[in-house]
Amino acid sequence: MLCRSKERAEAARDEIVQETKNENVNILLADIGELSQLRKAVESLQSMETKVDCIVSNAGVLLNERKETSEGNEITYAVHLLGGSYLLPTLLYPQLQAAGSGARVVFVTSGGMYRKKFPSWPVAINDQSTEIKGEKIKYDGVDSYCYAKRAQVLLAERWAKERSDVTWVTGHPGWAGTDAVDDAFGDTKKYLEPLRSTWEGAEGLSWLMS
């Protein structure tokens, strides 16, 4: 598991081990949106494993206020798309190829993407150095989330053609009761109900992994 929080990662690992009785659950720590951290984590993995059978790109964030990583990228774009969906599979592509015909990458996307068409690239990544009609691009956290999720689907479609020796799939886990949903939607999350549990959300993704 590639995780940002050591405490939460260890808690998740303990729960997985308890439920599955499989002790072989390991943790690598990195913030997916910080590309330098991600590169180091991948180097650690590559030093231990010669092949990778499956990557599940599930790291995500949903913000109400614009924030940037230490490398200057808008966080939603950096986590969902640039780091988690583009750079991670690219760096591990040789290990995916080594795994053979069963290798696959699962992008955890969202039905929220249907709220928005994919915009121009500066709008999609909320590039503050670009002006449209003389004004800086306004930030909307939900829109940025939708753009990133639609971009994952577009990326999977492209790589299914360009990197066809690996299977590229996307999946929507359904609206699940998570802290991110609570923070982003507050009282309006009632319109998403009934919400799924995190385990229910993971069920379909587990099927895609196999």
Image: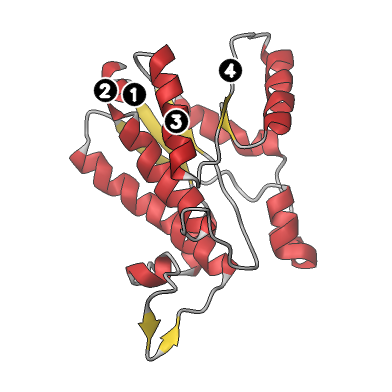
Alpha carbon distance from label 1 to label 2: 7 Å
Q: Quadrant of the C terminus?
A: top left
Nearest to the eye among marks 1 and 4: give it.
4
Q: Where residue 139 appears, x then y in whole percent? A: 54, 74
Alpha carbon distance from label 2 to label 4: 22 Å
10 Å neighbourhood of mark 4: few (<14), some, or many (≥20)?
few
Q: Residue at x 44, y 21 (%)?
A: 45
Say how many tags the image has: 4
At label 2, the amino acid type is Gln
10 Å neighbourhood of mark 1: few (<14), some, or many (≥20)?
many
Of the pair 188 and 76, the residue shown nearer to us: 76
At label 1, the amino acid type is Ala
Q: Which residue is mark 1?
A: 103
Q: Which residue is mark 2?
A: 97
Nearest to the eye among marks 1 and 2: give it.
2
Q: Which residue is mark 4?
A: 26
* Element on which disc 1 rests: loop
Q: Name the disc covering residue 40, or none.
A: 3
Q: Residue at x 42, y 64 (%)?
A: 125
At label 4, the amino acid type is Asn
Q: Is residue 193 visible?
A: no
Q: Which numbered disc, 1 or 2, marks the residue that appears first in the sequence?
A: 2
Alpha carbon distance from label 3 to label 2: 21 Å
* Element on which disc 4 rests: loop
Q: Which numbered disc, 4 or 3, marks the residue that appears first in the sequence?
A: 4
Q: Which numbered disc, 1 or 4, marks the residue that appears first in the sequence?
A: 4
Q: Which numbered disc, 2 or 4, marks the residue that appears first in the sequence?
A: 4
Q: Where residue 108 appears, x then y in whole percent? A: 50, 43
Q: Name the disc covering residue 24, or none.
A: none
At label 3, the amino acid type is Lys
Alpha carbon distance from label 4 to label 3: 16 Å
